Amino acid sequence: PTWLTLALLLRFHAILIMSGHSGRRANLTEWWSDDKLLRWDWVTTIMPRDYFKWLLRYIHFSDSSNYKRRMQAGHDPFYKVSFLAALCKHWCTLYHPYPELAYDEMLKHMTGNMSGVKQKLPRKPGGEGLRADAVACAVTKYVLDIVPYAGNEHMKAPMIPGLSPTASTLVDALTRVNALNCGHTAYVDKYYSSTALALHLARMGTFITATIRDDRGVPAEGQARTRCAQVP
């Protein structure tokens, strides 16, 4: 189209960045609403609504020529967002986190027909969406790595003998962000934690703070004192 210019593309990206930064997850049409309570004033001044929706529909950042469909060998449900791995690797080179790291799962609202990818987590806000495990600096909340989840059959993290798939994913994420053998402390919930994981990380110069379920090998010292054991 004749109206598409470089300046307009820059404005389009600015809106996307600010929408995530500000937490504006409402219907896109509300940003250009006549209602002052719903309208996002600065957006209406830099781009018409129809231009934004057209760009959002037709701009893609993935090469679909190598995409493997479902039931084909090598199918990757996150092929179109595989560039996230390169971004995460770049983020780690730009920022050195505090010793305290947080690892937890998040649930992001998503649209589109991605069967097998949407997860239901009733205890999370929203209840359904794209599940991803994230490593972040516990002090600044800077995200260092994001690992989308689409089932154990699509897990790319190598399995570690003696650890569960979720614990292996945690160790793999800490490895990618260069957090092992550096004296970092990972704060996780009981979904990931176990005595085996704590001992494995301790041998790699990394500590963990978490609660441990009774069926995951609570140390005798912890059983004698409290139901929540602290393992260095």
Image: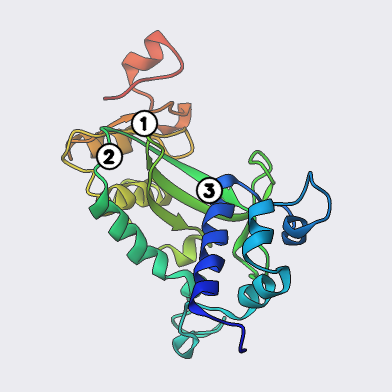
Query: Relative to residue 54, is residue 225 depicted above or below?
Result: above
Q: Where the C terminus falls, by quadrant?
A: top left
Answer with left or right where residue 34 lies relative to residue 88: right
Q: Is 139 above or below relative to 132?
A: above
**Within-10-Å neighbours for mark 3: few <14, some 14–19, many 20+:** few
Q: Tell me the element at label 2.
A: loop
Residues marked 2 and 1 touching at CB (< 8 Å): yes
Which dot marks residue 97? 2
Image coordinates for residue 226, horizontal then vertical, percent: 43, 12
Disc 1 to disc 3, C-alpha distance: 18 Å
Image quarter in which the N terminus is found: bottom right
Q: Amino acid at mark 3?
A: His
Q: Amino acid at mark 2?
A: Pro
The label shown at residue 101 is none
Camera-side mark, 2 or 3:
3
**Crowding near the residue tagged with mark 1, few <14, some 14–19, many ≥20 C-alpha atoms within 10 Å:** few
Of pointers 2 and 1, the one earlier in the residue sequence: 2
Task: Decide: is 13 above or below 80.
Answer: above
